[in-house]
Image (cartoon, rainbow, N blue to C red):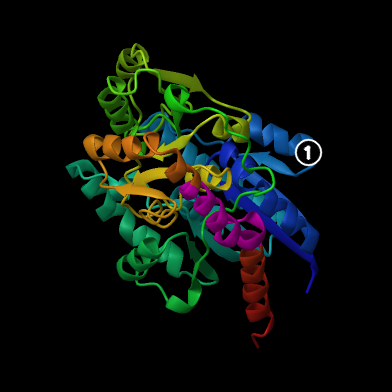
Amino acid sequence: MIFTDLKVLFFANTDWYLYNFRRRLIDSAGEHFGTLACVSPPGPFGQKLFEEGFDWQPLPFRRQSKSAMLRSSLASRRFLSRLIDDFQPSIIHSFTLTSILLTWMASLGRDCVRINAVTGMGYAFTGQSFKHRLLRLGLRPLIRRALNSKDAWTVVQNPTDQATMLEQFKLDPARVRLIPGSGVDVDRFAPASRARSGSGLRVGLLARLLHDKGVGEFIEAARALHEQFPQVEFLIAGDPDPGNPAAIDQRTLARWRGLPNVEFTGHVDDVPSFLNSLDVFVLPSYREGLSRSLIEAGACGLPLVTTDVPGCRDVVDDGVQGRVVPARDGRALADAIRTLLEDEHLRQQMGRAARERVVREFSDETVNEATLALYREVLAERAARP
């Protein structure tokens, strides 16, 4: 069924996320629905959406300080309320807990379906400090109200988050869907020739420069392996995220940049080329919704080394597509990387298995069709009401 007279509003808390992770979904939705609009804080990727013909609206929102965040949240709510009144969306699809809370508050009293995509539990729910436990106490009742409100549906990316959401927020299981990630273009992310061997190998990490992405453990592993593999390069691709509580401070980054076998590449525009320059891909994250970088690397036929946490272990079976090690354990990480550096046949075998799994389970075609099927389901349910 094609709902040509209906409208969909996409909202994320970064323009980068909308463009890089949901661009293909927005395209697919445009083929089935009448009108689309996209909202995010301002940035170059939002401008790209606009230049490519999408109705993109920059949202007044800042994360840099608590006072600025409070003021911008109030401004964002007013902005979203006006936009919802003007655009009259049939569906609002929000990504991340921050966006979910803002759209819930902004859409109170409005007649629209909200698809709440929980792309990860967020630092407030993964941090273990007293401050984070206190923050959880305050946020939990708000999130419960937002997710259980009228015409709200919840999408999670891994089974652990699904169980957590059902238990902590008392959700109706009939209104919760497990859709694995945002999907990747398996034609764009595809294996290329790897002619290197022996000492010329490259091990890479693609992530924001955050402690909870396991950057410190990656550095620890690089140090531990340098004596045995002095010519192996360890590459870290990604930007700092100064507004994030888990951001790595500049002094620490400067110290790490001085290591002889570690290179910080910064942001990379051509991610497939970066991945295909590697021989092993590593993500030692503390928790993910469903790791996009692991899926992209797997699509490129790379063996994967990751941690035994939600959103990572759901992509890699230990001993099949790569190795799975305990989180926050740099020594175990080094041992897993060593195993792959020493065995070319194993790298090739695990890389093939990683590619096969991504094509089978995590392609954007598979994920986007599941999302559009949910749109059709919720709209059909509304249409059937007396």
Residue at position x 29%, y 26% from top? Answer: 225
Q: Position of residue 17 (x, y in %)?
A: 57, 42
Q: How many numbered marks does the figure carry?
A: 1
Q: Position of residue 121 (x, y in %)?
A: 37, 52
- Of helix, strand and loop, which one carries label 1? loop
Q: Residue furthest left?
A: 130
- As for residue 361 lying within the magenta part, the answer is yes
Q: Position of residue 177 (x, y in %)?
A: 50, 69
- As for residue 47 lying within the magenta part, the answer is no
Q: Quarter-wise, where is residue 194 in the image?
A: top right
| Residue 142 visible, this orientation | yes
User: Which quarter of the rendering shows the N terminus?
Assistant: bottom right
Compared across the picture, whether 358 is left or right of 254 comes to right
Compared across the picture, whether 226 is left or right of 21 comes to left
Tell me which amino acid carries mark 1. Answer: Glu
Judged by its main secondary structure, the magenta piece is helix
| Residue 212 visible, this orientation | no
* Residue 139 or residue 184, whichever sits in front: 184
Q: Residue furthest bottom?
A: 386
- The span shown in magenta is 349-368
Q: Position of residue 250 (x, y in %)?
A: 35, 17
Residue annotated with mark 1 = 52
User: Which quarter of the rendering shows the C terminus?
Assistant: bottom right
* Residue 36 or residue 353, whichever sits in front: 353
* Residue 312 or residue 114, whichever sits in front: 312
Residue at position x 37%, y 37% from top? Answer: 213
